[in-house]
């Protein structure tokens, strides 16, 4: 089979090589998926650069968000009660060495789910990862409620655009923060009530103006650095700051007297820990996310459908911060 391998560590364009390799075989509790499309995420970039908290051994195939069909099941795997069998169309989260930038991916049976029929191939691949992170952050951890104000940083990105849609579905007033008019237009099209272009406006000032000085109830931050400091200065009383990652590259330390005197909570969300420790919670999240998709409340924002041969360039674009929405590699090029 074809597979993109990361054979050393560094920038995606420099370290990925297309190889022919035997397809992985499923072990106990595992399944293989014949991949049609693979959505890329910032963790894939970090793994190329050895900056992710879970680093697979070299060589490995990136790509944790997969759409395709079940190819083979390992010993002890029973999928019948979930309506699945070899040949079923599924969305899946890849794990370990054999990710979705290959003709066949390997994953745990607990991380394979029936694909909703309302989405196309690329949208199906992009449904689980970003929306799972958003659901865990906003629904489970921050307990976002109708009528509250949600501030979303990097709102035109893959995870940010999912958070905007989930916030709207929850009945929140959504303020999306992005950079530049091109991305601001995308966030408006997503339906955000207010859009802040940080190249032209002060995030802190605009949030205070929009909320009559009260601030945002929940801030969703996949960027870190300056975005995090902005959130601490415009968070409401009893607000919740949800830390998703550090896509901006800067990991800050914070004096803990500040959340004390302003009375706000800091919540960290690592979706990978749920897939490893609590697959039942992941299953609940995917069921609710799929229902929202069927109802038309959410739809993945696809920035580009990328031919398989261009996968390293797509990951490099993600690394360089020039993408909008999700970059999806069409492993089956005929599906473009």
Image: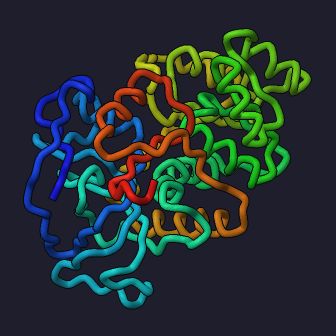
Q: Is residue 282 above or below residue 270?
A: below
Task: Name the quarter where the N terminus is drawn.
Answer: bottom left
Q: Position of residue 244 (x, y in %)?
A: 50, 36
For the residue pair 291 and 134, the one nearer the viewer reads as 291
Q: Residue at x 24, y 32 (%)?
A: 48
Tell me where residue 279 sits by quadrant.
bottom left
- Relative to 94, 122 lies left or right: right
**Up-down: is 74 above or below 252?**
below
Tell me what residue is drawn at x 20 percent, y 55 percent. Answer: 98
The residue lying toward the viewer, choosing from 139 and 319, is 319
Q: Nearer the viewer, residue 101 or 136?
A: 101
Residue 244 placement, left or right of 10:
right
Q: Is residue 321 left or right of residue 152?
A: left
Residue extending furthest toward the right: 212
Q: How many marks?
A: 0
User: Is any atom of residue 238 visible in this view?
Assistant: no
The answer to whether any part of residue 277 appears in the image is yes
Q: At which x and y percent is residue 229?
A: 59, 16
Q: In this view, which residue lies farthest toward the front?
A: 334
In terms of image quadrants, where is residue 196?
top right
Residue in the image at 69% along x and 48% along y: 165
**Colour scheme used in the picture?**
rainbow
Residue 80 falls left or right of residue 221: left
Q: Position of residue 271 (x, y in %)?
A: 43, 49
Q: Residue at x 13, y 63 (%)?
A: 23
> x and y percent of residue 2 in the render?
18, 53
């Amino acid at each position: 089979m074809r597979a993109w391998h990361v054979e050393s560590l560094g920038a995606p364009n420099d370290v990925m090589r297309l190889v022919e390799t035997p397809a992985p075989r499923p072990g106990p509790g595992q399944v293989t998926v014949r991949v049609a499309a693979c959505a890329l995420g910032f963790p894939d970039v970090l793994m190329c650069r050895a900056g992710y908290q879970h680093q697979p051994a070299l060589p490995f195939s990136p790509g944790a968000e997969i759409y395709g069909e079940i190819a083979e099941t390992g010993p002890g795997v029973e999928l019948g009660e979930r309506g699945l069998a070899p040949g079923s169309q599924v969305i899946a989260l890849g794990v370990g060495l054999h990710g979705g930038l290959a003709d066949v991916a390997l994953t745990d049976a607990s991380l394979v789910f029936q694909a909703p029929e309302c989405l196309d191939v690329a949208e199906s691949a992009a449904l689980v990862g970003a929306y799972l992170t958003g659901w865990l952050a906003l629904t489970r951890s921050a307990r976002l409620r109708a009528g509250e104000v949600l501030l979303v940083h990097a709102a035109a990105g893959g995870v940010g655009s999912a958070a905007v849609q989930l916030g709207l579905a929850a009945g929140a007033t959504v303020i999306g923060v992005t950079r530049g008019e091109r991305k601001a237009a995308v966030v408006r099209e997503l339906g955000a009530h207010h859009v802040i272009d940080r190249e032209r406006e002060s995030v802190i000032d605009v949030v205070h103006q929009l909320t009559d000085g009260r601030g945002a109830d929940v801030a969703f931050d996949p960027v870190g650095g300056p975005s995090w400091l902005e959130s601490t200065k415009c968070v409401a009383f009893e607000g919740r700051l949800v830390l998703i990652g550090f896509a901006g590259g800067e990991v800050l330390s914070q004096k803990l007297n500040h959340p004390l005197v302003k009375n706000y909570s800091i919540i960290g969300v690592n979706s990978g820990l749920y897939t490893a420790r609590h697959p039942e919670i992941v299953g609940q999240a995917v069921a609710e996310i799929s229902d929202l998709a069927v109802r038309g409340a959410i739809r993945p924002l696809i920035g580009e459908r990328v031919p398989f041969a261009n996968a390293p360039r797509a990951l490099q674009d993600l690394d360089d911060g020039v993408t909008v929405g999700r970059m999806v590699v069409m492993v089956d090029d005929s599906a473009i």
